[in-house]
Amino acid sequence: MLRWIIFIGILLVADFYAFQSFKTVVKSKIGLWVYWLVSLAIIANVIYQIETSDRSSGMPQSLMLSFGLVILSFVPKLFMLLFMFGEDISRIIRLSINFFKGEGVSIPSRRGFIGKLALGVAAIPFASILYGMTRGKYNYQIVKHTLFFEDLPEAFDGFKLTQISDVHSGSFDNAEKIAHGIDLINEQESDVILFTGDIVNNVASEMDDWIPYFKKLEAKQGKYSVLGNHDYGEYVSFNSVQEKEQNFQAIKDIHPKIGFDLLLNDSVYLERENEKIALIGVENWGTRFKKAGDLQKATAKINKEDFKILMSHDPSHWESEVKNHDDKFHLTLSGHTHGMQFGIEIPGFKWSPVQYVYKKWAGMYEEFGRYINVNRGFGFLAFPGRVGIWPEISVITLKKKKQTA
């Protein structure tokens, strides 16, 4: 009960200040009543969805939508709160000055232009969030990288891979957009397609409708995948241990159904013209989530001197174990963060709240001559949208760096 009191209290404080701004523009009593009816309906809906949703199957789309509506309503009101609360501080200061000057204690009235300015500023996050919920979540971006390595085998000069991550098929609600995303991946005509985990939100059945779409993915030298933290069914309640194990097996069985070779702490060699590079896939390993990954086991069949590409869902694995490993892992492919599905990215600058949790959270990073690419994710979870951090298809070309004399 206390959590609901706190939650509703925070929302109502924001609503109270936003209302002060709203009524500087809307004078109709009907309009003012509509404001409160809509605000209270959004709050009531999310509480209802949380209390009545079947948590045994994870987070249904109706619950995600209710969260989205709260964010759509609440975030713009925070901007209005800042303006209107600032106006209240100004009014208190003016009241104090008047009191000490002996001019009485009447409370200065609000200035109308402040309320209108607050509404104007709040329209920016409102429009951004609305776009993110309706179109941004399927605004696929092709992000290309070219990496140079001195020890890349000659035959792999120009080798191209496509990485996708965090499909979260249980969140999909638009088949046409998913088909478009699949087409974009195939248009890259890559040598391999590598998927770095979280094919579902929680249960295998979420992928049933989407298997025919992902079966269409094509790559010249194969498709490979690993598991993410959501693929273990850890965030839902099962009736028995056996039911949980059956779900986990069903999730693993999805991968061959869509033509992917699932690497469970294992490795394979990719070969070209009698030369080879090692592709390693570990199970999920994270500092905050499940640690099922076993790098030693995954590399047991390859040589220390091999050129290595590692697939590991959580980028904290790279920070904790991979980048300083005695064996050189030339390129690590991760996902997991989604870039929090919210942030700002412009040339030369990127920011998201998730960067305060993960050092490597979106894009390509390099340390000690070792690279990690953190894919922003193909799908979305919890918040049914993306604002500023768009869904990503990574295309990475490996090039042989010529040694200088």
Image: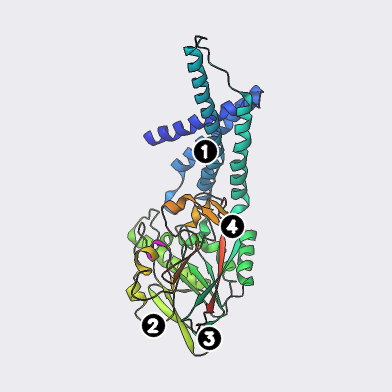
Give residue 45's mark. Answer: 1
Observer-side mark, 4 or 2, equals 4
Gap in Å between the C-alphas at discs 1 and 2? 58 Å
Q: Where is residue 52 drawn, in percent x and y?
A: 46, 42
Total numbered badges shown on the rendered structure: 4
Residue at left 49%, top 16%? 97
Identify the secondary structure beneath mark 3. helix
Q: Earlier in the sequence, mark 4 or mark 1?
A: 1
What residue does disc 4 label?
347
Observer-side mark, 4 or 1, equals 4
Q: Earlier in the sequence, mark 2 or mark 3?
A: 3
Identify the secondary structure beneath mark 4. loop
What amino acid is at disc 2?
Glu
Question: On the image, which quarter does residue 370 sit in?
Answer: bottom left
Assess disc 4: are there few (<14), some (14-19) or many (≥20) residues with their C-alpha within 10 Å of its C-alpha.
Answer: few
Q: Earlier in the sequence, mark 3 or mark 4?
A: 3
Q: Earlier in the sequence, mark 1 or mark 3?
A: 1
What residue does disc 2 label?
305
What residue does disc 3 label?
155
Residue at left 53%, top 69%? 163
Question: On the image, which quarter does residue 309 sit in?
Answer: bottom left
What amino acid is at disc 3?
Ala
Quadrant of the image containing the N terminus = top left
Is 127 placed above or below 136 here?
above
What amino acid is at disc 4?
Pro
Identify the secondary structure beneath mark 2. loop
Task: Give the residues in magenta.
Answer: 311-317
Residue at left 60%, top 30%? 35
